[in-house]
Amino acid sequence: MMMETPVTTIKEKPPLKLRHELKHRISYSDDQAVTHRLRKLFRHDANADSHGIYRVSSLYFDTPYDKALRQKIDGVDCREKFRIRYYGLDTSFLRLEKKFKIRGLCGKHSLKLTEGQVRDLLHGNAEFLLKDGHPLGIEFYSKIRGQLLAPTAVVTYEREAFLYEPGNVRVTVDRNLRAASDWMHFLDPGLLHFPVSDGLAVLEVKYDAFLPEIVAMAVQVPNRQAAAYSKYAICRRYD
């Protein structure tokens, strides 16, 4: 008698894709100079408005002992953080994201969520994450229960993004960084925030195996070097 193969609802984990990521905090004048060059050389992200800019709102999760925050501040080589994100004022497209760093390289896994599912998470209901067997949902659920991951801070800013296909390069300039502690109203686009940018923008360059010379030249800023920087960590300073 032939035995039937058990059926599992657990999907395969997405392949691990790691990228280089460089970050610089830049002044208003440096921002103007860099973006002037970028606009002449590269195309904007197709999802941006007519000026090439869109709003990013993220809700970050952390443990009661701020594991993700402490690992970032301490420069732990292998670390991760979870967030939920939407763009512009449209809360109909929401994603759970796990961002991780391994030996200086960055990666990200994501899972699309509905507005109702996000509201469930805001009220402490996470069981739905187990229903479709998505690996990221299962991992997130296990860490909500095992590590007591919970909503911690809302981080919002305006982003101007540029794309360059060779090297799969993405250059972003993030401005007007602001934070909110009222995470229960994360899905309200009118949520009250407070500014934390100190008048500076964040220039990020992400690429795969190599950084084309044309991009390296375009993002050059005098007397600036790439440095570790976290919008989440900056916003947590104001808890």
Image: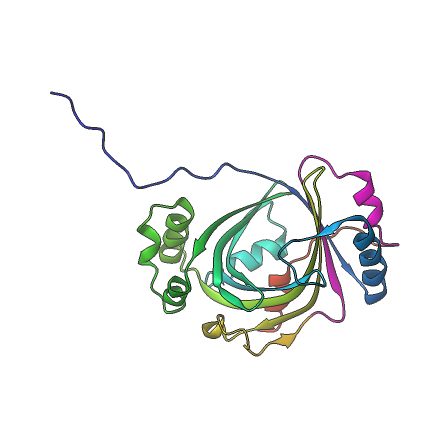
Q: Quadrant of the C terminus?
A: bottom right
Q: Position of residue 196 (x, y in %)?
A: 67, 72
Q: Residue at x 56, y 59 (%)?
A: 69
Indicate whether residue 203 is drawn in magenta. yes
**As drawn, which residue projects farthest toward the front?**
50
Could you say which is closer to the camera, residue 218 or residue 226? 218
Q: Quadrant of the N terminus?
A: top left
Residue 47 in sight: yes
Q: Residue at x 33, y 48 (%)?
A: 132
Q: Residue at x 60, y 48 (%)?
A: 76
Tell me: residue 12, above or below residue 122: above
Side (left or right) of 61 relative to 29: left
Question: Which region shows up in magenta?
Answer: 197-223
Residue 65 in sight: no
Q: Position of residue 193 (x, y in %)?
A: 60, 76
Q: Position of residue 53 (x, y in %)?
A: 68, 62
Q: Residue at x 35, y 60 (%)?
A: 126
Q: Position of residue 66 (x, y in %)?
A: 51, 61
**As drawn, which residue projects farthest toward the top?**
1
